[in-house]
Image (cartoon, rainbow, N blue to C red):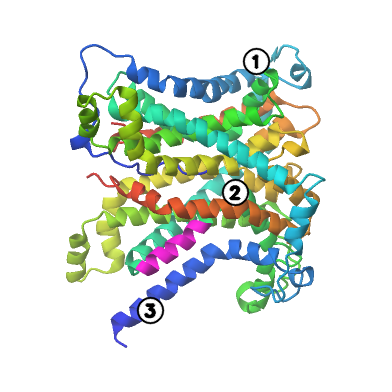
Amino acid sequence: MNGRTVRRYGLNALGLAVFAVAVFPVAWMISTAFKPNEEIFSTTPRPLPAEPTLEHFDYVLGNGIAEVSFWTYLRNSALLALATVLVSGLLAVLAATAVARFRFRFRTTFLIMLLVVQMVPLEALVIPLFLDLKQLGMINSLAGLAVVYIGFALPFSIWMLRGFVAAVPRELEEAAAIDGAGPVRTFLRVLLPLIAPGLVATSIFSFITAWNEFIFAFTFLDDQDKYTLPVMMQYFFGNASNEWGPIMAASTLLTLPVIAFFLIVQRRMVSGLTTGAVKG
Amino acid sequence: MLDTAPAVGAAPDRRSSGPARPRRRPRPGPYLLIAPTLLVIATLMFWPMVQIAIMSFQKVGNRQLAGEPAEQVGTENFSTILSDDLFWQSLRHTVLFAVVAVSLTLLLGTLVGLLLHRLGRRMSAFVAAGVMVAWATPPITAAIIFYWLFGSTGGVVNWFLDLLPDVLVGGDWIDHNWFATPLRTYTVLTVCVVWQSFPFVAVSVLAGLKSLPGELLEAARVDGASAWRSFWQITFPLLRPIFLVLLVLSIIWDFKVFTQLFIMSGMANRDAFNLSLYAYSEAFGGMNAKLGMGSAIATVLTLLLLAVTAVYVRIMVRQGETS
């Protein structure tokens, strides 16, 4: 073997090591979820279950957590995420079009505002928003939470979408206008199909934002059957300490959809990050 | 919330489709399009920020939650927290954690980014996908998983440390309680947060590296420059804008870490508070809600973060991201 081959093997080995470190905690979660209790608390833990079992998943999906079915938590989380995706997606398309297609007064101010707003600590906003929603009688309601999530997902969605709108050649819209299409028709038939991939990517990010959010859901929701998956997880973790099998089974069910979505958008995101990185 | 602010935004192709030249008569179009967004952001972000500022000078407790008007107390909330050792301890934890976690995240992320750049195409894609898994894990499950990994019954970390030769790491790891002192809790928290945040740095650095002209590094190699030297002389200066943005974003994110600490340590463990957990616990933790006190702490946290955000905005404006 010459020096170059040795170096390539070395780099690949290093790459595999990085892969292992990055994936290990999630792999361990999944592996624990399938292990019978003796194996979970064995003094010599093994990477894979020797006798894989579905008992922990059966427990979580069958018994539910705190007398409430797992599917209720899942439904709450899914509904919230769906509402967030739809509304923030719609508003983001409008605002992104304004920013990418028009030059107007306060445009730069608007863009700077979007940047600032993304950095505001939500951990601080939870106090006043709790009071506001309480006064509106929207505490302990998924609708109130959805409104808040829409606000959180919106700035980043606009920021991401505007690049996609700007990348659509203006000539296409002009051609449609010359052919007699009105602005609404032009938007629906020309612009919307072309920015669809961008819309998919932003939707997935809004989805993950709503799906993962913990502190607001934890603060706002009182009734067990309104809990979202992260609040259920916190409750379960706090009340069933050391029942690691079921806890890891529930974590797996909460985590895998997010990882799947993330891997779908990863390529788009990396390329979105690439362009214009160094403008000299 | 998902940590995905744009380090480097997608750049529109300015020649073919930049914003139109200003028209003579102002048209309502763009304003109508951004109106709903403005409304949402004003009610959900700006107004609450004003409210925090107002409430930090008020006493807002259970009586006020029941409908009584808030009581003005002047700067009492601030003088209470500033004379409270717990505040200074929380501030110290916040800053120290941010310094350590940000340094480790940037170091590890950069190294992995450089590695991904040098791997073959398939291997690079494979490792990048694995790294994405760490990034994608929701904070709540990440915290619970790390609590389990570092647990004292059945925890794999203690088992592994016990296997290592005692000369290296000392003995007696099997019953080690990783959550007994604030320092230990923050050690686990750091490992957890760095694990979750290095992928973003790695992927951004990789993206930057791909955009560099290959000839420069090639020329440096031909001239016999070491990898160390060509990084500091060529790569780093060219990628400076990216590193700046990554630094600022990491500081902002690590400064306000909440969910993971809430899971690992909780509201009962006051010794391990950071600012965001302290604010939350003052506001909602006790039997008597102290929303005014919580707001005062939240104001301090927000002001600190806005200062860092100002740096971020300046960099983005200079890079032309807002044009």
Q: Is residue B273 visible?
A: no
- Residue at the far front: name it: A180
Residue A120 versus residue B226 in the image, above or below: above
Q: What stretch is highlighted in magenta?
A: B122-133
- Residue B193 x, y percent position in the rendering: 56, 52
Chain ID of residue with mark 1: B
Write the residue at 34% across / 77% down.
Answer: A8
Q: Mark 1 points at which residue?
A: B74
Q: Is residue B110 visible?
A: yes
Q: Does the magenta stretch include residue B124?
A: yes
Q: Do the residues labelled 3 and 1 touch (CB within 8 Å)?
A: no
Magenta-drawn stretch contains B307: no
Q: In which quarter of the image is the C terminus of chain B?
A: top left
Q: Nearer the viewer, residue B230 or A227?
A: A227
Q: Quadrant of residue B43?
A: top right
Give residue A156's position: percent from left, percent from top: 44, 36
Dominant secondary structure, magenta: helix
Q: Do the residues labelled 1 and 2 touch (CB within 8 Å)?
A: no
Say which residue label 2 marks: B139
Where does label 3 land, which residue?
Answer: A9
Of B3 and A258, nearer the camera is: A258
SS for dot 3: helix
Q: Residue drawn 56% across and 48% down?
A: B97
Locate residue A116 relative to residue B174 in the image: left or right.
left
